Amino acid sequence: MAARLPLAILLALAVAGRAAAQDYDFFYLVLQWPGSYCDTKQSCCYPSSGKPAADFGIHGLWPNRDDGSYPQNCNPDAAFNPSKVSDLLSSLRAKWPTLACPTNDGLRFWGHEWEKHGTCAADVFDEHGYFQAALRLRDQLGVLAALTAAGVNPDGGYYTLDQIKGAIRQGTGFEPYVECNRDEAGNSQLYQLYFCVSAAGDSFVDCPVLPRGRPCGSRIEFPAF
């Protein structure tokens, strides 16, 4: 008769198996305001497809752990393959644009996001599913509409952190973590928004932990783009 493993060992193996399959607890969906990316000393370059729309674009969909750490580069054999997202390319260009210099087509940016972050959610998404989910979640929020409905407009005006968070909470039902950067004159400006998504990648949740982003000043500029 085969020897039986003690229950404690069986439980440990089961937990280890789940950890190997899903080494994270939730996702950050990170949205970026292009006007703030470009209004810095390093400036920006429009993608080869042309200037993106004046709307929040996706920076990434990042698996994270409740302790603030995160997995990365989980499968070096799963290199980004543009042919797998060929039906999404027009949406990616419009809603997940690259503004890095020199001017490029975005493939390197999307490849970086998939290989560093997306491969760590392979238990939930294949490559196509990862990008499709990020696009769907971004559209579901409608952040710019929520801000403008509350009178927070991208016209170079200044707002408080409470005004920005309150407008987004009122319009979307969720309050993001707000990250700011600095323009050439040193003014604090609205840069990135972090929303938390369930480990299944299909719904928004309250954030279990906040990221370590750059804090905002008391007056936050919302620059035009």
Image (cartoon, rainbow, N blue to C red):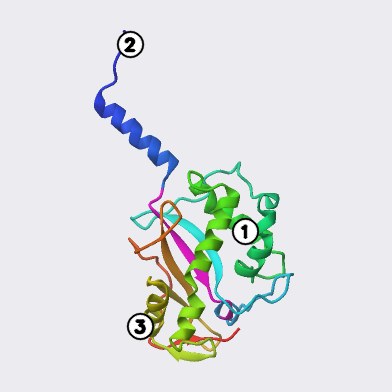
Is 224 colored magenta in this rendering? Answer: no
Q: In this view, does 15 lie to the left or right of 184?
A: left
Q: Residue 50 at x, y = what percent?
A: 72, 74
Which amino acid, by three-letter code, is at mark 2? Ala
Q: Residue 135 at x, y = what percent?
A: 56, 62
**Quadrant (top left/top right/bottom left/bottom right) for the C terminus:** bottom right
Q: Residue 168 at x, y = what percent?
A: 41, 77
Counting other residues with Cα less than 10 Å from the Cα at mark 2, is it few (<14), some (14-19), or many (20 or more)? few
Q: Residue 93 at x, y = what percent?
A: 66, 66
* Residue 188 visible, this angle: no
Q: Tag on residue 162? A: 3
Which amino acid, by three-letter code, is at mark 3? Asp
Q: Mark 1 points at which residue?
A: 110
Label whose residue precedes the other's in the sequence (3 or 1): 1
Label whose residue precedes the other's in the sequence (2 or 3): 2
The magenta stretch spans which residues?
24-35
Q: Is mark 1 on a helix, strand or loop?
A: helix
Relative to 194, say whether 144 is above or below: below
Residue located farthest toward the bottom when viewing the structure as drawn? 157
Relative to 125, say whether 182 is above or below: below
* Residue 114 visible, this angle: yes
Q: Tag on residue 215? A: none
Q: Tag on residue 2? A: 2
Q: What element carries label 2?
A: loop
